[in-house]
Image (spheres, coloured by chain):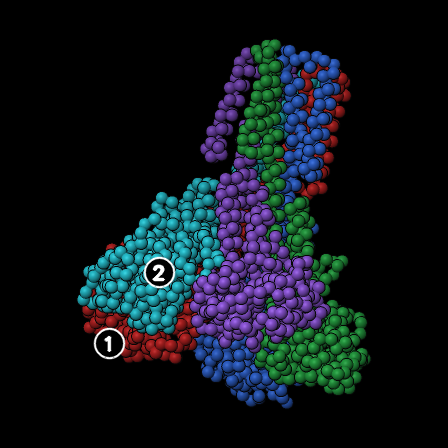
Chain colours: A purple, B cyan, C red, D blue, E green
Amino acid sequence: MIQSTKKRSQKAGLPPGALIHIGDRLEEKSKITVINYGEEDFSKAEVKTPDECAALKGKANVCWVNITGIHEGETIEKVGQIFNLHPLLLEDIMNTDQRPKMESYDSYLFVVLKTLFYDEKEKSAIMEQISIVLGTDYVLSFQERETNIFDPILEHLKNGKGRIRKMGADYLIYSLIDMIIDNYFIILEKLGERVDNLEVQLVTSPKTETLKTIQKLKKEMIFLRRSVWPLREVINSMERGESPLIQSSTYVYLRDIYDHTIQAIDTIETYRDMLSGMLDIYLSSVSYKLNEIMKVLTIVSTIFIPLTFVVGLYGMNFKFMPELKSPWGYPSVLLLMLVISLSMLYYFRRKKWF
Amino acid sequence: MIQSTKKRSQKAGLPPGALIHIGDRLEEKSKITVINYGEEDFSKAEVKTPDECAALKGKANVCWVNITGIHEGETIEKVGQIFNLHPLLLEDIMNTDQRPKMESYDSYLFVVLKTLFYDEKEKSAIMEQISIVLGTDYVLSFQERETNIFDPILEHLKNGKGRIRKMGADYLIYSLIDMIIDNYFIILEKLGERVDNLEVQLVTSPKTETLKTIQKLKKEMIFLRRSVWPLREVINSMERGESPLIQSSTYVYLRDIYDHTIQAIDTIETYRDMLSGMLDIYLSSVSYKLNEIMKVLTIVSTIFIPLTFVVGLYGMNFKFMPELKSPWGYPSVLLLMLVISLSMLYYFRRKKWF
Amino acid sequence: MIQSTKKRSQKAGLPPGALIHIGDRLEEKSKITVINYGEEDFSKAEVKTPDECAALKGKANVCWVNITGIHEGETIEKVGQIFNLHPLLLEDIMNTDQRPKMESYDSYLFVVLKTLFYDEKEKSAIMEQISIVLGTDYVLSFQERETNIFDPILEHLKNGKGRIRKMGADYLIYSLIDMIIDNYFIILEKLGERVDNLEVQLVTSPKTETLKTIQKLKKEMIFLRRSVWPLREVINSMERGESPLIQSSTYVYLRDIYDHTIQAIDTIETYRDMLSGMLDIYLSSVSYKLNEIMKVLTIVSTIFIPLTFVVGLYGMNFKFMPELKSPWGYPSVLLLMLVISLSMLYYFRRKKWF
Amino acid sequence: MIQSTKKRSQKAGLPPGALIHIGDRLEEKSKITVINYGEEDFSKAEVKTPDECAALKGKANVCWVNITGIHEGETIEKVGQIFNLHPLLLEDIMNTDQRPKMESYDSYLFVVLKTLFYDEKEKSAIMEQISIVLGTDYVLSFQERETNIFDPILEHLKNGKGRIRKMGADYLIYSLIDMIIDNYFIILEKLGERVDNLEVQLVTSPKTETLKTIQKLKKEMIFLRRSVWPLREVINSMERGESPLIQSSTYVYLRDIYDHTIQAIDTIETYRDMLSGMLDIYLSSVSYKLNEIMKVLTIVSTIFIPLTFVVGLYGMNFKFMPELKSPWGYPSVLLLMLVISLSMLYYFRRKKWF
Amino acid sequence: MIQSTKKRSQKAGLPPGALIHIGDRLEEKSKITVINYGEEDFSKAEVKTPDECAALKGKANVCWVNITGIHEGETIEKVGQIFNLHPLLLEDIMNTDQRPKMESYDSYLFVVLKTLFYDEKEKSAIMEQISIVLGTDYVLSFQERETNIFDPILEHLKNGKGRIRKMGADYLIYSLIDMIIDNYFIILEKLGERVDNLEVQLVTSPKTETLKTIQKLKKEMIFLRRSVWPLREVINSMERGESPLIQSSTYVYLRDIYDHTIQAIDTIETYRDMLSGMLDIYLSSVSYKLNEIMKVLTIVSTIFIPLTFVVGLYGMNFKFMPELKSPWGYPSVLLLMLVISLSMLYYFRRKKWF
């Protein structure tokens, strides 16, 4: 399940800029990968401490430092010193309870995003935070955990396929965000399949489980929406062309991922509408079932209750009941009861109860 | 049924500009039709490969290239090379999971739209994507499949009827969009008829089917809305007069189709409101029916249950029951029961239960 | 009933500017009335063909041409030629499925409005379209049918009462719109009375009819809203002072009708809110009634079912049932049953069931 | 009850500026009070006709003319002539079916407001319209009826307490509006108490009355909202500083009443939300009660119905029923029935039905 | 519980600027703490009367005066005279029924905020008002009651930890607001835990209590929202950089708390959505339970009612009933009843009723 809140309260009372990790505790060590590339060359190295990363910095056209694991305060602080990052920015990197946002500092842009992974076992989406810093000739990316989400970009860089090696750091950040948004569609398709399955199930055999699944999917939509909706504004403010760090030739690419974001939001809203409709159908099918049950009860009761009265009547022990002695008594009572029940059935038929 | 999502995920990980067709797989070959016309002349030719199309280009005032079938990457790419189109634009053409949008490039405008066809068999709308590129003297239109939606325009061009032959490429793109929006009203009227039928049916004989039809229509409205709503912005941004490709004399026509779009949106919203009202009526008529059933059950039960008690009372086998021996016992019990049932009926009548 | 859609689809495929009448087919001939007036003079004439109208045009300060009946294409076209109107404008006049709007052309303003009449028989509002063209010294008004809505203005013009004869064509168009909006309040009051009646009825005796009336009124509110809401923008854009055709001295009058429009919208929204509240009350009163019925059933059943068991018990034919032979058997069973029923009644009383 | 609409329709067809009183008919004569004051002097006089008021005008720094009773057309017209007011403004004063608004004329500002009084008997709010005209050195206030709402201001003026005597006419209009808004909070507190009482009542003993009270309060909130909401814009447009009639030193006071208005709107919205929540609770408690009733019915029925069957079984008159002759027949049937009822009770207990 | 309204009405009729305390009456005396600090020095003193505070003012770089207890009119008035504050501002400080707001005066900024404390006993949030005045070199904070919310800031000031001692008064006001917003997250986490508990409880054992808890939490969300939502605008207007009192270097910090506010609003909205979903689940589980009960009733009744009729039939006392005399009568009736009940069970099984 996507968590509703993280333990942000532990920071209350600390001065701003305090580097406290907010998120799931992890034991693994942080891993730092430094990739340098230009139109002609490409190198990739894994370093132990951020200091080595400093040594590698600035050799090629673009330097991309990818840090996985953000729970170690000193590592983040070191990176901050090397790239001269604002303490509040470092604080935001370590606090995984962020809303997607873009902040423009003097010599770099800071972008916080959420990636989504689909947990097949739990059948729900897992959310992770990715923070990206864009400088003139470098890109820093911070991930909570090691994932393979950026592997295709690494592949393109190594092969020199596409235009990525010829472009600057702003094209790299675009590629990273593009990859993250492409990932959303994978999640949305999985959820879409579940919504479609649910719809089929609702028509064939609605159960109490169905309601719980509807509510669970609705809740996931709330969280998805919460992480995709602000993305729109993030990309929009990047595209507005106010930062000199983003070249105007990159705008057309940003506009493209802006369209994708709108598309994702649109899809989420459509699913939300569909789930609401399904809730209505479920509730109404419950009412319908109650009606069915009541109809059976009413038909059986209203037919037999008068008959039972009649047979009770002639079960009375009065001395003077002339009908009891007549040989036609029994057959005529049977006939009477037949007439009563047939007229009842006719009445129900006319009322379209069965 | 209008699909909720297309398999967009297959593109995740590919570099931007990769020409992957997203949509229903088709076997037919793409068809390219080249129409050249000016005030005096008109020619129409069907070409096999985009190269021939290049040969025909630029001979007359306006050149309209209509491509049906967008699943062949090479064809689209060739057309892109000839008309010098941006790779992202080509990608968008092949991806049929687009939101309607307008994008302004340096020397051409790019418009993505959705057309709707009514499938009589399925009784639902089918959506297809149409992409249009407007250059200074040419218009390219890309359709998913061969349709006859643009036939009337071809007719007007051939006959020289109306002002279309005298006007430029911007008037042609207006005519294409106008035709697409006119098509929306055909769909809306069909849906409107179904909404009206449903309303009649709801009053005369509400069934469980009715609810499902309401929900189905509601869902179609969601999808319709999703394809018409962004159109408003598309036309608005064309009309704002920022592109030199659209002459100011065409603005009055764009304003006209803008009005039509608003009209279509308005109609969709009205249907949505009506369908919501119908859902309320349906649910309330279900409750009403339950009440009716309960009333019958209650009247029958409450009248006969006491009577059955009375006849049971005199069915007891006690030795010493003086009433049983009295000759007036039986008639007075019958009288008593008549009084009980009549007073019950009076009580229910006063409560207005029947 | 206000219709939900008109047969707009018949226009699909025609070139823009095609004069096709969309609306109810009428047999009557169009009627053209030409009114010329200035501060000192006033003349009114009924003409057969638009050509005569041309002869009368321009003699006085202001020329008002009122055309009732818009289904004859040639008449509209002739008027269009005489006053030099744009083909799209003529198309809009003949298409009665328009949203209220204002369009500013080079030398005239075009306003489309909806008037409402109350059909006493059907107890619902009828909507008609009125198109008005404002030139420098003329006003053209196009009505679907002959109505007396503008009679008071004619009266004022004839008598020279008020300031209308001293003012220009812009004051005339203001007067026409004012008259149309005043008409809305008549409709709103009629609907308001029905809403109030419904509320009284809901409290005294809610029936299934009540629900249908609520839904019918709700639907009428949707249509009313649809025709009044855009009016706000229409008047607002006239008042913004961008057209030289409207003198600044007329702004104060436009602001006045703007206020009236807001007032009308406000009233509609209030009715909508009230109707929603009434739906809640209705549904809840249905639930309440079900509860009442269930209570009666439960009280009667739970009292008599145990008693019936008891009398059945002593109706058994076992040989060895000592109670049956005891002379106190019958009275003590009667006493037992009295105790059972009284304790049941006490229990229900404590539960506040009656 | 706050009325939903007033008889505005009687004005349809009249030329603009016609002075027709729309509102409750009153018999009393209008009363005109003229207050002149400056930093040093203060005088108050009651005049019979507006002409006398003209004589008193302009003697001191600020002249405040308070007119109670607006149903006499000639009085209003006279005042209009003396102070040179626009006919449309006079029309608005006499029409009590106005929305709160501010209009800026050349040499004066016109403000329409609603005051609320709490009718203890009806337990609901009564709404009255107050129109205020602000000139350079005079303020005209028009009330529907004589009230004591402005008494505190008169008191301050007489005593020279506070800064009011030193300030201009714009401070007087601020004081009047402040007094009106302060009055809203009295009403809101009364309604708030009723909302709180209702909440307590809902928990302890929900009745059908409760629902009607909820709906009545909801309706009052709709009307309150309608009169307070536009006030926000009124004060905002006064504060924007576009009128030379309002000195910049008064802005801080206007901002203060702007805050109060926001506070009032906020409170209304909160009450609306609370009432919606209470409706949910009410409806759910009705469902809950139905469940309780059904449980009792079901427990009693399902226990006794099988038992009644058993005793009926041995009430049959078959010749050959061996059980009837056995001396253990009766006790074992009694035992059987005990077992049946106990196991039923156990089943219901496990289902947590009681 | 958070109160819905405070007794604001007692102020109606008083001139603006009247210092009347609106809020809970407190007996304690006000406490004034004066803190002076610069980069090098720090002093903290508790003073008895505001006059002493004046003596201490202006000695160091920044002077922070913290006043706890705002119910004493003279104290507030004195402070107002010393720091030259506007009477309306003082009135706002004493009125605890304020909406969060920022007001910009000539030489100081005025900010009103709400802090939230969690009352463990009542399990609900308590709201208190904090007013802060920012001058060039001083900050005044007014609290309703003594709390330890600002203790961490005092600690940082004393230790000289962080940058706070080096920064100006604008950084101090930022720190105070930051502390207040951090506090919100503590409350939100407590509420979040309760929402999560409720969700678990809803699935395992829904009770009537559950509904009341949902409603109580919903109500708390309304009040939380009401105090956090306007905060957004407050910080936004501080950050917009219009006041010379806030240095541009502080903007980055304000942007940080702006993000936190958005985060808090987001969380509140998510909880509201979740609570609405839970209400749906609760209501539907109530319906489900009703269905279960009805099923048991219907199964038992419809099986035994026909059987009871059969046994009643052969309990009749007719002389001529051939079946009664047959030795196979009893066994065949028993068999008949077995067949009836088994076929009923089969029917219910097929209907999936058990």
Q: Is mark 2 on a helix, strand or loop?
A: helix
Residue B77, which numbered label? 2
Residue E105 shows up from this direction:
no
Res. A225 image quadrant: bottom right
x and y, in percent, of residue C82 in the image: 22, 71
Tag 1: amino acid: Gly
Residue with the most extreme left position = B40
Chain hosting mark 1: C
Which sits in the foreground, C282 or D243?
D243
| Residue on which the image places disc 1 | C58
x and y, in percent, of residue D297 in the image: 64, 35
x and y, in percent, of residue E214 in the image: 65, 53
What crowding class fits label 2: few (fewer than 14 Cα within 10 Å), some (14-19), or many (20 or more)? some
Which sits in the foreground, A160 or B10?
A160
Residue E278 shows up from this direction:
yes
The residues tagged by marks 2 and 1 sit, at their Cα atoms, a distance apart of 62 Å
Please give the name of the residue rendered at 51% of the width and 57% of the height, measured from the top-left corner.
A183
